């Protein structure tokens, strides 16, 4: 039996980064950039108006109020730029290029209509006001986003503004999901009292999807060594990583450890001193394809998914190790009783309050208790050497869901 730390180290040491390739920007969320994004032109590419109003020469406003003829109009997207002559102005809109001759934009709020084709400037304006200068955000050729960045929505927007439709980024692992158990049925089937609806399949698929990992297939297999071995072989042929649920303990119907050996994978972890999640298995198949054997009880499966499988998949995507296992530091709203021993996880609800994150434990009856699981947002990490946690203490909370 390994400790949590030993397991974590083994998983991180054996989940190498996948190679980089061209990724469409629509698929790039959460990918790690393999080479910098450069500005293909100055940003903004020209002097532009930041307001709706009038383009003028500031010197002409010296004796405001002053009335002038409106000799042109430039909207965002207008290529034409009639020059603004001395003593005249052009109507201009946010995002439009500044016409030659003008050096200032006056907001429409500082003007009033003065009959057809004329406008009165009620106050003066300092030269250069309300203009976004060419290149003030970035110069052509400069680095907009550095290699190694985990791409978020803003980076994808910026890539698009630099004219990119694809980016060179590390590939995310494609995952094959396998649930095992002769008692399992698809959720749409009528179930006898001896049968169990496969909830891990949909639950794990949803969690993987929320974390941004593509699922290549979701398979269900009975407790049969040959069937599990065949399925595992098929999964390894199509996916970069396999997530299995059930059948990893030491019972007479637990064939996953033997199937892992049968496909030639090297078992690196089998059994971790955590509760729930003790039977967790981690193995490496050929071409460094990891296999994560999660225990079948739904809350044990969720615990091991968030402790090991998702962090490892992030690592394979090139994420820095420190970012792979996110924790929220939160204030505990109720004391947690525990006896020192194994590290364990207590389901809890998270609230974002004005004074910071707060967690309230949700007592669960067992690791089969998905009803309680549905009232929680993740788990408080209770260290093995802690004899209970006091109300008001700052604790580590592992979020199990994504907040929009
Ligand atoms: P196992 O890890 O296979 O010994 O399963 C432990 C418990 O989890 C048993 O009660 C199983 O019926 C249950 N279980 C296993 N896999 C699933 C699943 N995919 N959906 C729901 N319950 C499951
Ligand atoms: Mg089973």
Image (spheres, rainbow, N blue to C red):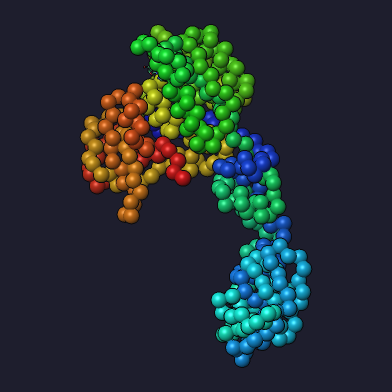
User: Is residue 238 shown to the viewer in this render?
Assistant: yes
Residue 186, given in percent of the width and then of the height, sits at 47, 17
User: Is residue 57 shown to the viewer in this render?
Assistant: no
Residue 220, given in percent of the width and then of the height, sits at 51, 16
In the rendered image, the quadrant that contains the N terminus is top left
Q: Nearer the viewer, residue 186 or 232?
A: 186
The correct choice, above or below, for 158 with respect to 100 in the image is above
Residue at the extreme front of the image, as rendered: 115
Instruction: State the residue at coordinates (31%, 34%).
Output: 346
Residue 149, given in percent of the width and then of the height, sits at 57, 48
Q: Is residue 383 left or right of residue 11?
A: left
Q: Is residue 330 left or right of residue 106?
A: left
Instruction: State the residue at coordinates (31%, 30%).
Output: 372
Q: Nearer the viewer, residue 205 or 4?
A: 205
The correct choice, above or below, for 345 with respect to 73 in the image is above
Q: Is residue 57 left or right of residue 254?
A: right
Instruction: State the residue at coordinates (67%, 45%).
Output: 167
Residue 379, given in percent of the width and then of the height, sits at 35, 36
**Which of the 4 image quadrants contains residue 100?**
bottom right
**Which of the 4 image quadrants contains residue 88?**
bottom right
């Amino acid at each position: 039996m390994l400790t949590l730390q030993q397991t974590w180290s083994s998983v991180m040491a054996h989940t190498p980064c996948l190679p980089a390739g061209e990724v469409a920007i629509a698929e790039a969320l959460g990918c790690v950039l393999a080479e910098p994004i450069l500005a293909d032109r100055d940003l903004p590419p020209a002097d532009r108006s930041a307001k709706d109003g009038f383009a003028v020469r500031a010197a002409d406003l010296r004796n405001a109020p002053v009335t002038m003829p409106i000799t042109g109009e430039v909207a965002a997207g207008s290529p034409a730029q009639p020059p603004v002559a001395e003593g005249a102005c052009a109507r201009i809109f946010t995002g439009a290029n500044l016409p030659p001759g003008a050096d200032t934009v006056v907001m429409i709020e500082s003007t009033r209509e003065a009959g057809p084709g004329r406008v009165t400037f009620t106050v003066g304006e300092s030269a250069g006001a309300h203009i976004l200068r060419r290149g003030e955000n970035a110069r052509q050729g400069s680095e907009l986003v550095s290699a190694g960045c985990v791409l978020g929505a803003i980076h994808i927007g910026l890539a698009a503004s630099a004219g990119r439709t694809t980016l060179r980024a590390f590939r995310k692992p494609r995952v094959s999901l396998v649930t095992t158990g002769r008692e399992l049925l698809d959720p749409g089937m009528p179930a006898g009292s001896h049968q169990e609806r496969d909830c891990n399949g949909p639950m794990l698929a949803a969690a993987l999807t929320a974390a941004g990992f593509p699922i290549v297939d979701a398979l269900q297999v009975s407790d049969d060594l040959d069937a599990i071995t065949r399925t595992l072989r098929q999964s390894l042929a199509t996916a970069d990583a396999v997530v299995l649920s059930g059948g990893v303990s030491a019972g007479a119907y637990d064939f996953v450890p033997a199937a892992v050996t049968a496909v030639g994978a090297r078992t690196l972890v089998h059994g971790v001193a955590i509760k729930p999640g003790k039977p967790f298995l981690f193995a490496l198949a050929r071409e460094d394809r990891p296999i994560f054997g999660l225990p079948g009880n739904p809350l044990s499966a969720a615990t091991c998914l968030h402790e090991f499988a998702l962090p490892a998949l992030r690592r394979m995507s090139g994420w820095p190790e420190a970012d792979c296992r996110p924790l929220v530091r939160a204030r505990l709203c109720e004391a947690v009783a525990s006896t020192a021993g194994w590290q364990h996880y207590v389901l809890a609800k998270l609230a974002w309050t004005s004074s910071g994150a707060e967690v309230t434990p949700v007592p669960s009856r067992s690791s089969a208790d998905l009803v309680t699981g549905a009232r929680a947002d993740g788990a408080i990490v209770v260290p093995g050497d802690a004899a209970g946690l006091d109300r008001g203490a700052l604790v580590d909370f592992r979020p199990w869901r994504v907040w929009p």
